Image (cartoon, rainbow, N blue to C red):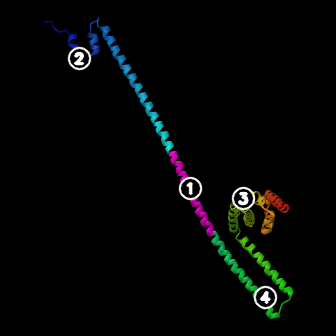
Amino acid sequence: MRRKSRNDRELKLDKRGRPDNPVASIMNADPGNLNSELETLKAQVQALHENERRLLDMVKVYAGLLIGMAAILVIFAWFASHKNYEQDKAAIQTALEKSNEARQAAFNRELEKTLNSHLNAREQAMDRKVTELAQQLRGQMSTNGGVSSNTLVQLNEDIIRRFQLMPDLIEGRYAPLFGMVYFDYAIRAANAKNQPLAAEYFLSASVAFLRVRDDRLRDEQNLNTSFARLTQMCFPALRAEDFTARPQIEEKFKQLMELLDANNVNGRYTVALGDLRKEFFEAKKRAKAK
C-alpha cells in the first residue's frame, strides 16, 4: 500500500467533491488541469460581477421608483394643502368682513348716539338762551313801559343771528364727528342713486373735514374722496329743479370754497378748487339751459 504524500494530505475536498481551498488545489493540481481550474474561477468571478451589476441596476430602479413616488406624494400634499389654504383664506376673509361690518355698525350706532346726546345738550342750551332773551325782553318792556320798534328789530336780528350761528358753532366744535356722519349719509345717498342729496352731504362732509384745524387730525382720505364724488358723480347729474329744491347745495358750496381758499397753503388744494368750480358752474349752466 502506497503511503500518501504531503501534498495529498493537504488537499481536502468539500461535500460536493470540490477542493475546499481553491488556491491550494491549484498549487497542488497537476499542470494539465491548471488551465481548466483558472477558467472555472474566471467564470465564477465573471458570474459574481454580473450578479453584482444586476443587483446595482435593481437598486437604482427601486431608488428611482421611490424618488418618483416621493415626488408624487409631495406634489399631492402641496396641492391638497394649497386648496385647504385657499379655503381657509376665504373663510378668514369672510369672517373678517363680517367682523368689520359688525364693528362699523356698532361704531355708527355709538356715533349717532354720541351726536344725538350732544345735539340734545345743545338744543337744551339754545332753549335756555331763548328763554333768557325772552325774559330780558319782558323785563325791558316792564321797566321802560315798552320798547321802540328799532330796539325790537335789533333784538330780533340778534336772535336770528344767534340761531344761525348755533349750528355752525356746534359743527365747528365737533367737526370730525359731523364729517364722518355726513360722509356716511352721502355714501348711502350715492348708493341709492340720489345724487342731489349725495351732493349736499358730500359738501357738508367736506366743510366739516376742513374745519378741523389740526392737519394731523384732518381726514384727508375721506376729504379727497368727497371731492372726487362731487366732481365725477354728483355735479354732472344735477338739474335745475335740484338747485331749486335744495338751496343748501349752493350755500354749502360757497362755504367749501371759502374754507379751501383759507386752507390752500402751498397750493395743496389748487387742483380741487379748479375742478370743483368747473364742475359746479357747468352744472349750473346745464341746469339753466334746460
Of residues 20 and 66, the one drawn nearer to the viewer in this rendering? 66
- Front residue of 54/246: it is 246
Check whether the beta carbons of the residues at disc 3 and disc 2 lie within 8 A of each other. no
Counting other residues with Cα less than 10 Å from the Cα at mark 3, is it few (<14), some (14-19), or many (20 or more)? Answer: few
Estimate how packed mark 2 is, as few (under 14), some (14 to 19) or many (20 or more) residues with alpha carbons within 10 Å: few
Q: In the rendered view of the protein, which quadrant contains the N terminus?
A: top left
Screen quadrant of the C terminus? bottom right
State the mark number for residue 94: 1
Q: CA distance from mark 3 to mark 2?
A: 102 Å
Q: Is residue 162 above or below residue 271?
A: below
* Amino acid found under the numbered disc labelled 3: Thr
**128 drawn magenta:** no
Give the CA distance from mark 1 to mark 3. Answer: 26 Å
Q: Which residue is mark 4?
A: 137
Sequence-first tag of 3 and 4: 4
Closer to the chain start, of discs 4 and 2, is: 2
The picture places residue 46, in percent across and down from the top left corner, at: 37, 16
Would residue 246 be seen by someone viewing this image from the given angle? no
